[in-house]
Amino acid sequence: MPETSGIVSNGSASDPAPPHDTFDTILVLDFGSQYTHLITRRLRELNVYSEMLPCTQRLADLSWKPKGIILSGGPYSVYAPDAPHVDPEVFKLDVPILGICYGLQEIAWHHGKNVLAGEQREYGHAAPNIHPHGDNKQAHVSRLFEGLLNDMDVWMSHGDKLSRMPDGFATIATSTHSPYAGIAHEEKEYYGIQFHPEVTHTPKGGVVIKNFAVNICRAQQNWTMEAFKDKEIMRIRKLVGEKGQVIGAVSGGVDSTVAAKLMHEAIGDRFHAVMVDNGVLRKDEAKQVKKTLIEGLCVNLTVVDASERFLSLLKGVSDPEKKRKIIGNTFIDIFEEEAKKIAKKAENTPKAGKIEYFLQGTLYPDVIESISFKGPSVTIKTHHNVGGLPEKMNLKLIEPLRELFKDEVRKMGVDLGIPAHLVGRHPFPGPGLAIRIIGDVTTEKIRIVQEADLIFIEEIRKAGLYDQISQAFAALMAGRSVGVVGDNRLHGYIIALRAVVTTDFMTADAYEFDSAFRKRVAGRIGNEVQGVVRVLYEETSKPPSTIEFE
Ligand SMILES: Nc1ncnc2c1ncn2[C@@H]1O[C@H](COP(=O)(O)OP(=O)(O)OP(=O)(O)O)[C@@H](O)[C@H]1O
Ligand SMILES: O=c1[nH]c(=O)c2[nH+]cn([C@@H]3O[C@H](COP(=O)(O)O)[C@@H](O)[C@H]3O)c2[nH]1
Ligand SMILES: NC(=O)CC[C@H](N)C(=O)O
Ligand SMILES: [Mg+2]
């Protein structure tokens, strides 16, 4: 990934003022816990800016100084030969450190290798006792637990424990199974807790995180979406320069629309959005996106109608991975062609220079996997990938949303004046209906799935359910089934409907419609979509299923 790829870069020469230079920043070092991203989340809810980096981050490579460091939990045992450890320089930086679970054990390990496997694992709820510490006359509750009472409800998930207290540390909390549920070295401002304050199962966890970040690290609470947005616009302006041009792929989805609007605010018409009609979009999507982006948001947009090109390449292809690769590669070819055309046009305009950057709407969850020190996990599905593009075209990436979660991006969208119905849209995958049609893709099948999808979404909106559902769509099943239409036999198609509720799209539950709703939609699709004889509802959760159908 190029150095300038986004705002988590450690600050390259061409990267004027990344947020960690402008906002007090808490550095979260990730040991691979499932909850690490929640720590950054909780901090931002406090208006404290934070960045997450792999636990193996070398401090010498960091161009900025954090206000404090949080060491996350992780699945390893610190005493195992291959266990990950932080750069020892972390302990020479003279900033407060909070260790959570593995992080606590890592602090202890660094101070005397005193961690071992416990006899009893501790999963779930616990109610630790908060201990006053200090000498007898001046015993006080640790600053980490200020404002908290005993028997606070916390969530634990560990099997290892400290064998003894590291030198200079004191116990600040105990629980039935954890004599070292909380430890502190108040002079050095090092704190360790065995429980997870970042999860919602620890209701007062936010207070612990606030005590650490605001009271102990003295981080200013000035990170707001508004301030972030304004600073990001300034940063992009400086980065791109007075004449630089930027190209970006937009789909009409939330992420690329917000990124495009932000880029337009920053550099106006020197930003060129390109939307590809790949023939497998939802009904009238290309027309609608054009209207929204050009008329509604004044963004400079070219819609490339490449539907015939895509459909001829997809002809006879049934394997979903092959479909994804064909679509991904053709996307890349088309953007490359468009970038050349735009560059050629710009040759004659004195106000604009060459195209140097490529805009992507990458979000934080997309990044977590790739920056976790464990490295990317196995490929379940090849996500259509515009990431191959900048390298091939010699462009540098700009990813202004790289630090944000979807709901934060939606908030930024609203701040940028994008209408709520657009920022609230359900996600739609780049390979589109091609992966919602099982088997080969034909124009007839595309028509059927588009019409069924339109009815399903229309009814969901009418019932006022759209915002309660994270993603809903129609898919077309393989094979045919016999129906009877107007006294005739019809060997027709089968539509499946899927609606899920999820926060991060990594796991999901089926949304439960009432039977009147289900009958109404099935009835409408059967009657109105020619060729359909059967409508099924799919209710498997993810896992074991996935959200898309292929
Ligand atoms: N038809 C398309 N034309 C141009 N670019 C596309 C198209 N489909 C997808 N992309 C690009 O792929 C990126 C990833 O797609 P993805 O669906 O994850 O995001 P999105 O469409 O912006 O938002 P959402 O997740 O809400 O659908 C988009 O941000 C966009 O850059
Ligand atoms: O832009 C995208 N390009 C893709 O190739 C792609 N594949 C799946 N998805 C979306 O990702 C989420 C999780 O989907 P799955 O459970 O099917 O993996 C769901 O929201 C899917 O719609 C994609 N989005
Ligand atoms: N959640 C964690 O960080 C667990 C840490 C360590 N693996 C333990 O079992 O104690
Ligand atoms: Mg999309």
Image (cartoon, rainbow, N blue to C red):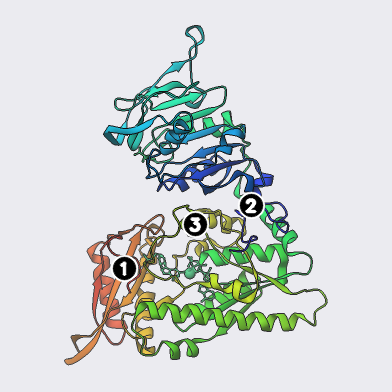
Q: Are marks 2 and 3 in contact (CB under 8 Å)?
A: no
- Between marks 2 and 3 in the image, the one whose residue lies nearer the viewer: 2
Q: Residues within 10 Å of mark 2 (few under 14, many from 20)?
A: some
**Location of residue 252 with respect to 401 vertically, above or below:** below
| Residue drawn at (48%, 24%) of the image | 184
Q: Residues within 10 Å of mark 1 (few under 14, many from 20)?
A: many
- Between marks 1 and 2 in the image, the one whose residue lies nearer the viewer: 2
| Residue drawn at (44%, 89%) of the image | 313
Amino acid carrying mark 1 in the image: Arg
Q: From the image, tell me which residue sits under label 2.
A: 10
Q: From the image, tell me which residue sits under label 1.
A: 498
Closer-to-camera residue (294/434): 434
Callout 1: helix, strand or loop?
A: strand
State how far apart marks 2 and 3 are (Cα).
23 Å
Total labels drawn: 3
| Residue drawn at (27%, 71%) of the image | 520
Callout 3: helix, strand or loop?
A: helix
Q: Is residue 541 left or right of residue 27?
A: left
Amino acid carrying mark 2 in the image: Asn
